[in-house]
């Protein structure tokens, strides 16, 4: 994949006009409030992760609509907390999988929460297992999750996922292992998009996050994405509109409520983004659109010139290990 | 696509052992009975199809679980019936679309019913619009419809679709335009698989069909299909099992309830199949497995040597026009 | 296929300079006159199309060079005419096929003529069967029809096809089923390109058409097409020039006589175009080049944003059903 | 391309039954006789090939139907002859190109004739320029030359090509530069298939060839080729039969007249074949079918294990340089 | 990728004859002895891995030819040892990367050593950095490492790698953190092939391993691999032989010294293999060939039916976590 | 491949700023001087090339580092010289192969030298056989030759190749068959890039070349190439930087010493370039960058509009045959 998008110089200045719906904040405030009418039912049960240096807890809490969402909470073995905490959302298709599988931030000494993405998890298998328990899950759609309920923000799949992400914050903050004032959200691809959404919705939910670290984030600047790439998962939307040609306006209107450009504008936490200049899945202009519009000026972006959607991988781990240490360290000194 | 499956000589003799679950008939009898506890609510409303020689009715009836399923009923303009009737099921991704779109059997002088496939319809667009209104639609699955609820026959997507297909027969038989004793079911690919299922379940539902005409049918001999092709939609199942490796046995058990080999064995109506020897979507050995096990010895199969999944197309139209005329003609003489 | 061509805003303004040969009109006037020196030999023979509501006639008439061209004429069963008439040309590779196969406009109440494209028909099979009976058919060329005789307008394949298309108008107008003053030409892809050619040549032939409805038309703005896409059939030309590198100028000169941009300029009938913004076969800029230069200001274009070469399909049927009804209705009131 | 065909052990024993038409010899004897009723009109005109050590003559002679076929005759500069001679036929798409382009056998000290393949030449460009001047060239066909006139041996494209190949022998034997009793025919791919045909037809034409050296020959055992590969050019035939489904028997009957298995059986000259075990264009079983049935027991085959359709390339040059030297040397000693 | 290799039933019985060179043991005994004439120069330097619960040491030791090979040694933070130890070799293209990147076995409580593969490491980047310091590295080869020096066992690339792997055992056994009698070797793909080689050579080197756990191992049954797949890295060898056609015998002879089938026969440690039935990179028959010939009857193989080269991933982690715990536990009780 | 790069109008004006390292000339002067400290050891041994009209000599001389580089010297049979001479470098993967394989310029009456490219030759096979005998050949790299030693100009692979090319000039000039004052360098793709390098370095080496004829040259304007194409061999570099993300600056700095834009600026001989406008391997803007910056105003470029990396092939032969004749002719008259 050669470079097919704007040059880096232009990307750094790229601030496209992305229309936000007039009732964006109301829509989300209402969605959060409605979700919080459900009992959170957060539970944390110790499990055998087959590891010696990490303790893991099986987590369940009420997501959008009240149905249970699953996750893991990892901490250094024997820790009683409260710890600075990293909340991680998954990339498209992923899930929490087995208890030993994703422990980086616990290895680094933090509490590390990973959330199942409802309906997905098929690429991780294992103990991924959070259905999209919603009457809207079966609305006519193209294969995948991108278009279920896409003609109305009320019924759209990501309404449920983003609220799950906010409720995950509610849930982990009830754990004695977690310092509720020291939370960073992170994730790659879809997990990056959800991180931005969580960072944008956290203020509406009355939660102060310490940081937001989206890697090669998905779910940003949909309209451009649909024009510049045909790769999945964005491609699922184009395929829907290829058949349901009369739904173009309704779908684009719905997506504007979920666009990382619009939600990131609402964010107040410092941010560390990453982007890959040859990424055909999450094209760099869509990432920079979100980055440049992101709501806190204390932000930085790691640029990987010759990478596609894998982005920085262990290089970005290093960048994040340093940045998280600095963020948590600064918070500890206050 | 060169010929990748068995030779025609071997295909004609191919009768693989496909295990049928002990409670196959019970499962389906129970499913039909349960569906029939719902009010059928069949309605037929004339619509403007923009055509001069065909009249079309917008049909709705209660499918599995009671939620409405949509369809079209086409007849020669001005007909009052009752007419010999062709019930057509769609290929994967298709839907009823616009009212003018699929009228061949009405042009031939019959009543022609086309049924929406729940949740699908995205390749047809138009007025396709039957959601999969089920609490199981959002169970963890790979993109597509093939794996939703696949670990249990009770929750599997095609349980709902096959029952919709039986209830479609219940519904059209209430119309004065339809001669309830003169019905042929047909369809290509997924529609062929549903046709076989409908022909197999009709006896359990107390319905005598005059014929079953599946073209390049899908949903037959799943286990072999998963081994011999990686093309979608069968490929969706392989992708599910690639992640959820521990679900192999459960999934294969579920599929045995829905396999055209097992359901076709129950069928009593004469049949006209078609098969394409270079078809990587519905490999010929999976089609011949269903054909050779099909329950009525009055059967024939059109073989297209150099075709892939498109099969016979207009050549098969001709074969069916002749066969349907013969079947309906013979029935008229009784 | 993401959007790879100009943005819709730019497409609407796109009026490239496409040089027309000085003798364009002479060349075609001479070609028509020469063809009309042949006896038309139009014949219409009723055939059994296996349909109840449509009557079909096997048509033959003398095309370019006098050899017979085949077609079907469909009308509502029992009609005696004269009827408003739709003349349809086929997409590349297509042919008239079987008599039951393509009847939409007859279903809508019109006379519907479909013309074989000489030498082609291999994707339709059936009764497609009009050879390219020309001494130039065997001139050195790349596989396909696009380059046969391409170094000289006199010998180029599409000279014969375009004249066949004009002679088809001559032929159908001799039928008592056809109202010779109420003809619309239409077709998709190659059929769209031939429609534009027929609309441009009709005035030179003294024929007043009521409308021209090209869908995702091919054969327009060749030079840009050769630069912006490598997909067939345009790709056949690029492959020819890849080998016969010294024929570039001669080939481009020849193509200028057949370019829908130049021929559409000569058209006088109202038009309804369609275009798909992700179409790599007939890129949108080549379609808009023809549309924006088209000779009658009473024109419109349906734009399909997320479609590739399939274009509008049944959505465009609806648009055409409405537009044809309006055109024929207005003509009936005169 | 991994090995997809039979193992080498099985290939060496592979002698499939390939039915030869009863009138095979009559058909070809009649075709040769008819061609010889035309005046041969062989001409040899010296041209500037821009080379110092090779002289080249522009050759023209009457091919099938009497129309001119072009070629080059190369000899070592200053030669007056008569020389042992190599007649080379081209691979599909090729042509004689420029006069300097293909001179290997003249460099080796022989007369070297290269024949244009009618209608083709587009991959060589240059001075390739022999049209397929036949009324059958425009019969309905798929893109390419493989299916033009395929429903009847009389009209099939390769009837004209094979006769051109025999008449090329007639033509070169009239040149004082050529020793008419010392001719080897050779070529790769299509050129290999034509070589076999020439070797099979030469006895019917009363010509004694010294050798036949087909490399990775095409045009052998069509029926198996159509089943085992979908690559072009064999794929052109499958595509024709994909549309014209009712022409399967007629096409296979026609091909039996042109099959290298059947024509090679008639050959009497010694042979050196080559084959590549990973060749998807000319699968090894089709080559071994022709080799094992070839009519002279004095034969050998070079086997390239890890090659695809490129075969032996310069390795095969070496094998042929040695074999030709031996053949011509032995003949000189008689 | 559908199943393209033998059925599971046949795989379980698949014991192909794979010729071992007469001097196989001598060759390797000599190679080990020669390597051990070099000073081992093993060093272990603590580094900052940015993790709280794992300590990491930068390891260097003399590999084949005496040049330094790099690796990491991870242990639970604060451990002083000696610990049961897992030695991991990398897949093709991989390297040790950053110090935080691969720590699973240290998280499980063991010492965990990862070895750089000389010359490779480009897919991991980071601190991968062990050149193939050999005069033979530049011998003519196809892109990649598979064919460097392939015409002679003395010069072949994997001679150096396999000896590096043995010397890695020598090196880690010098560390006080490592219990020299409790070592399991493991790795995926190339790392699996090296594991088998290490297990086969360890007895020659006087080292008793407790276990060998190769996942979807590469470097097994080369001859079949070259026939059944064209995917890299095996494909590199086929590409070499495609050009250097005269080197087939020499190359296959060389490979027989490095074949996991032959080296695994020499192994004495218990083994846990894994295999994926749709793996086109390391086809299942090549894996089962090594497994069925493996030298210790105390062996098992995890079979993943619907997976390609990713194999079991976290599922195999679980299987290995359990098996390693059992092996190390049993050893602790002795 | 459609046209994906700049338009021809813009290409003709395209003179990008490509930074040359300050010590570019010093680096190369030093490299040449160092190489010339080695004994040239040029040898010319007559071999049997199996051809009658060409004599061939097996050439060996000391390349970079003193290790032998192989080549062929072809001349018209019986020539004693001295002759005008064409020195040809190979495309990536190629080598001298067999002695009969590449003789065009000897056929044209000149001495024709072809040089092996160290380490490569795998696509030619035969007698290609010059290892890259360097301690740097095994430095960590991606498969292929493009990245071996790329972090330092001293260790980079092409330093050795370019010096081999200069030493080839030294070597051939010692032969009595060669007129040392009448040498043209040429080659396609990599051979074109090496030709430009040779033409740029010749003045530093005190050699006056008569001409430089690079076809579709590679190794020019690396930075743009890495952005505009992902095809190999440029793609090898991008893959290296995809893993070794921290090496971007070092690699680009190294490449600036080897860039045909910078080296061509130093050239003083007249030049004939060629370029193909649809070439994805050596994109036209990278070729024009070198052409427009080339150091002698007496230059021309053949433009092939519809070609990909094959470029002009025999058409370019003709252009070069004419241009070489003119150059050598003019030199002969001095």
Image: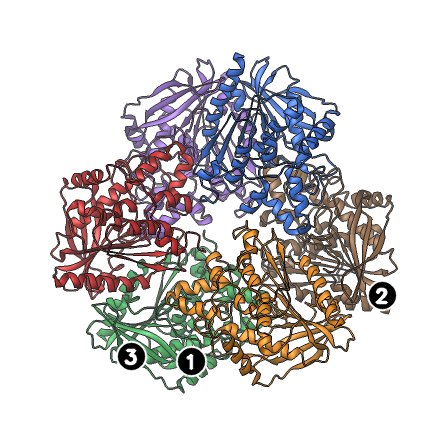
Chain colours: A green, B orange, C brown, D blue, E red, F purple
Chain letter of disc 1? A
In the rendered image, which residue does mark 2 sit on?
A: C79
Q: Position of residue C50 (x, y in %)?
A: 76, 62
Q: Check disc 2 and report its element: helix, strand or loop.
A: loop
In this orientation, does residue C145 appear?
Answer: no
Q: Residue at x 53, y 22 (%)?
A: D105
Q: Are marks 2 and 3 on the same chain?
A: no
| Mark with earlier residue (1, 3) | 3
Q: Quadrant of residue A295?
A: bottom left
Q: Are marks 2 and 1 on the same chain?
A: no
Camera-near label (1 vs 3) is 3
Q: Is residue A136 left or right of residue B187?
A: left
* Foreground residue among E62 and B176: B176
Mark pair 1, 3: CA separation: 19 Å
Give the left or right position of residue E91, taking residue A156 as reference: left
- Report which residue position mark 1 lands on: A64
Name the chain letter of the residue that bears numbered label 2: C
> In percent of the image, x 66 and y 32: which residue is there?
D161
């Amino acid at each position: 994949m050669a470079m097919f998008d704007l040059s880096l110089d232009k990307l750094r200045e790229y601030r496209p006009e992305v229309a936000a719906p007039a009732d964006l904040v109301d829509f989300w405030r209402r969605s959060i409030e409605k979700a919080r009418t459900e009992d959170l039912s957060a539970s944390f049960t110790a499990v055998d992760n087959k590891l010696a240096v990490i303790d893991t807890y099986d987590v369940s809490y009420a997501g959008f609509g009240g149905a249970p969402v699953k996750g893991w909470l990892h901490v250094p073995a024997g820790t009683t907390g409260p710890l600075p905490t990293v909340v991680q959302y998954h990339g498209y298709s992923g899930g929490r999988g087995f208890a030993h599988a994703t422990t980086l931030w616990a290895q680094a000494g933090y509490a590390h929460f990973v959330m199942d993405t409802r309906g997905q998890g098929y690429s991780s298998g294992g103990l991924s297992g959070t259905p999209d328990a919603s009457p809207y899950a079966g609305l006519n759609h193209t294969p995948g999750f991108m278009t279920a309920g896409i003609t109305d923000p009320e019924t759209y799949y990501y309404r449920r996922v983003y609220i799950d992400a906010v409720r995950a914050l509610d849930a982990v903050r009830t754990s004695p292992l977690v310092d509720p004032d020291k939370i960073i959200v992170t994730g790659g691809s879809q997990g990056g998009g959800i991180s931005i959404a969580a960072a944008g919705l956290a203020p509406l939910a009355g939660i102060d996050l310490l940081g937001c670290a989206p890697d090669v984030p998905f779910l940003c600047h949909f309209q451009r994405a649909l024009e510049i790439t045909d790769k999945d998962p964005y491609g699922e939307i184009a395929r829907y509109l290829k058949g349901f040609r009369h739904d173009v306006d309704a779908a684009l209107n719905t997506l504007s409520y979920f666009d990382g450009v619009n939600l990131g504008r609402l964010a107040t936490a410092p941010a560390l983004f990453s982007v890959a200049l040859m990424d055909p899945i999450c094209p760099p202009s869509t990432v920079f659109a979100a980055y440049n519009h992101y709501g806190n000026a204390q932000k930085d972006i790691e640029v990987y010139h010759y990478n596609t959607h894998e982005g920085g991988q262990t290089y970005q781990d290093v960048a994040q290990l340093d940045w998280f240490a600095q963020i948590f360290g600064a918070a500890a000194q206050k």
